[in-house]
Image: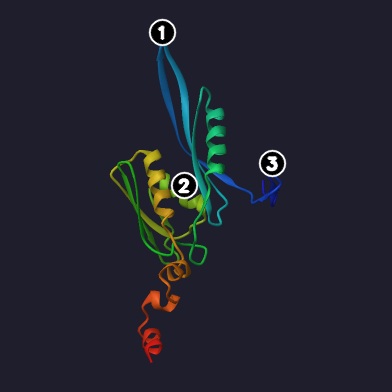
Amino acid sequence: MARGNVRDRFGREEQELSDKLVSINRVAKVVKGGRRFGFSALVVVGDRRGRVGHGSGKAREVPEAIRKATEQAKRTMIRVPLREGRTLHHDVDGRFGAGRVILRAAPAGTGIIAGGPMRAVFEMLGVKDVVAKSMGTSNPQNMVKATFAGLGQCMTPRAVAAKRGKKVSEIFGRPDATAEAEE
């Protein structure tokens, strides 16, 4: 399936994306003659190099719901800066509804220590080392959205330094670098 870069309908080159089905839920609509059943799907899409998106879709058949969710996920992709291409730069909290997640950077070799829906997000993002904890809810929709809220807060040290008008060495608070700057 590795076809390299693919052009989308606007002519832009797009990296090969992989997707992961997080959950499928059977939903019912009560009508005059009884119940009409449909399916809702939650999908996470990513390039495993720092871009990830999520989407949900509803349809009468499972494949159609997955297709709709995948299309929405491709439209809502975000870029997350990764340290050394394997972990987050700093710890963050994410909240959505009753869901609260804590995402922590981890040393090399730790692996992905996270619950189901969060694990799918990190795998599609390309994170190799992270520790995550979900609190408040086990609803996959809210957990994924809270994870994205946390990932949206991630910044590189260079971006933080630019925002504060300082140097990267001042942000890390190295005593030898700040002493030299004062002299």
The earlier-in-sequence mark between 3 and 1 is 3
Extreme-front residue of the structure: 165
Q: Position of residue 96 (x, y in %)?
A: 35, 44
Look at discs 3 and 1 and give the one toward the viewer. 3
Could you tell me which residue is drawn at 43 percent across and 71 percent down?
161
Residue position marked by numbered label 1 in the rendering:
32
Q: Please say if the residues under marks 3 and 2 sit with CB atoms less than 8 Å apart.
A: no
Could you tell me which residue is drawn at 64 percent across and 49 percent down?
16
Query: How many residues crowd mark 3 within 10 Å: few (<14), some (14–19), many (20+)?
Result: few
Extreme-bottom residue of the structure: 183
Q: Amino acid at mark 1?
A: Lys
| Helix, strand or loop for disc 1 | loop
| Helix, strand or loop for disc 3 | loop
Snapshot quadrant of residue 157: bottom left
Q: Amino acid at mark 2?
A: Ala
Distance between mark 3 and mark 2 Cα atoms = 27 Å
Extreme-left residue of the structure: 136
Residue position marked by numbered label 2 in the rendering:
120
Q: Is residue 135 above or below residue 87?
A: above
Q: Position of residue 32 (x, y in %)?
A: 41, 8
Looking at the picture, the colour scheme in use is rainbow
Q: Position of residue 142 (x, y in %)?
A: 37, 41
Look at discs 2 and 1 and give the one toward the viewer. 1
Query: How many residues crowd mark 1 within 10 Å: few (<14), some (14–19), many (20+)?
Result: few
Horizontal side of residue 13 vs 84, given as left or right:
right
Disc number for residue 126 = none
Horizontal side of residue 99 vs 20, given as left or right:
left
Residue position marked by numbered label 3 in the rendering:
9
Q: Please say if the residues under marks 3 and 1 sit with CB atoms less than 8 Å apart.
A: no
